[in-house]
Amino acid sequence: METICAGLVDLARGIRFEDLPSEVVRETGRRVLDALGCMLAGIGESTSQQVKRAVMEIGGVPESSIIGAGERTSCEKAALVNCTSLRFLDYMDGHVGSSPCHVCFNIPPILAITERTGATGMQLVNAIAIAYEIMPRFQECLPELSDRGWAGGTNLEFSVPLAVAPLLGLDREQTLNALAISISHGNALNASSRGQMPASKTIVDGMTAMNAVVSTLLAKQGITGPHNAVEGPGGYTLAVAGPFDYELLLAPVDRYKILDASTKWHNTVKCGRTAVAAALQLSQEHKISWRAIDRVQIGVALTDFQHQTQRSSDSRFRPQSRDAANHSVRYGVAAALVDGELGPDQYEPEKLRSPQILDLLDRTAVYHEVSHDAYQPAASPSTIKILTTDGQELSKTLLFAPGHPKNPITDEALEQKFRQLARKVLDQEQIEAIITATRQLADLPDVRMLTGLTHPPGS
């Protein structure tokens, strides 16, 4: 009987550019634009710079771009740095489902390999379609990995080798070995996602992606791996995930899963995005200043309530880091009501110490709204209740946040997000050229025409 790894390899190899619907090709360009924006905005930040310095000290063949830096390094190290900058602001896309699944972390290793090989835009689009098909399947089939102590980014160990293998010219047997090596060597603990969250949380996805790239390069040289790395003794099922639905995992492609990608419009976690959007809509509709708010209550589904109240509550009330604040719905709503928006700027150190935000945060509570449970995992609804100082009681419920596939943002809005993220690094001409290139991604004769635009002026 064929192994689960063999089934995944055949599934991935069956995805071909010529069969992709036009909406999948279009969405791939949107995903690349959003990811590039986050990388450009994140490259100048502390952890990204530390990782970049370490990588440049190690050295490597200058074959792949460090996005936004104007420097090149070996493909696997570029994947590490670019994943780190993509993660830093926590403003990247996700996939609708019960557990964390940020499929965009496949884009840095795929871009790095396309630069190494001189791949075309069509090859890039196909690789991204593969990655966005494979990784969400594990989200749909598995229980919450973090409950077993593993980071959600662990599942990059499946999608990255399957996506980059065609770019590197691997045959079926080599691809099978690449996947097997990656699975058996790439699992990431969830320890850095607890409490106040150390800087190492930002590199979890990059470390897994880097390992997956190296695994694929090793397999190309003939290194073999355990083909039963999923279901075999000591394999992924037993050691990491627990039992799950193999039949669902290997089901034929129906609706491409990239079409269910979710863009972050407000810079916070899933239930926070609906909460912040509802809070801002409520304050704007009723023209309420945050100074006129006495109390705020945030109603969320049970799973979200547990995440917000049972996991180091001190980090939810007094977050000391960008990551901790980003994962606090209370902080996100309070900051949004005080500043009128919630983007990367609301997580700067001075904002985490803002007396106005902290004062409103102390008057903000999360409660379990039972009626929201029925909508999960397809949605993370939130209800905002505001009691004003003059006795008004206002309420708004939102099922789907802006950016959810059932409430998508327009191309124009996504491009505006990119402009805001990229403007600190690139000039206006570069920004507009990248937008144009991603609109026509499949037409690029060489992906380096796109990545070359991400080098800062004069670099």
Image: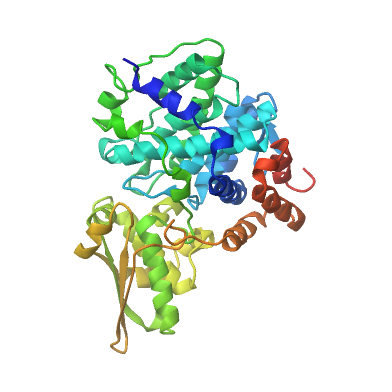
Which residue is pictured at 68% across the width and 24% down the height? 61
Q: Position of residue 50 (x, y in %)?
A: 57, 39
In the figure, is residue 253 to the left or right of 1?
right
* Residue extending furthest toward the bottom: 390
Q: Please say which color scheme the image uses.
A: rainbow
Question: Is residue 35 depicted above or below 272 in this figure?
Answer: above
Number of numbered tags placed on the structure image: 0
Q: Position of residue 371 (x, y in %)?
A: 21, 64
* Near-viewer residue (114 or 266): 114
Question: Is residue 220 depicted above or below 213 in this figure?
Answer: above
* Near-viewer residue (368 or 46): 368
Which residue is pictured at 58% across the width and 45% down the height? 25
Locate the C terminus by quadrant: top right
Locate the N terminus by quadrant: top left
* Residue extending furthest toward the right: 458
On the question of residue 177 being in view, the answer is yes
Question: Is residue 416 depicted above or below 293 in this figure?
Answer: above
Q: Position of residue 32 (x, y in %)?
A: 59, 46
- Indicate the quadrant where residue 368 lies: bottom left
In the figure, is residue 441 to the left or right of 293?
right
Question: Is residue 267 depicted above or below 35 in this figure?
Answer: below
Which residue is pictured at 53% across the width and 61% down the height? 345
On the question of residue 53 being in view, the answer is no
Q: Position of residue 104 (x, y in %)?
A: 50, 43
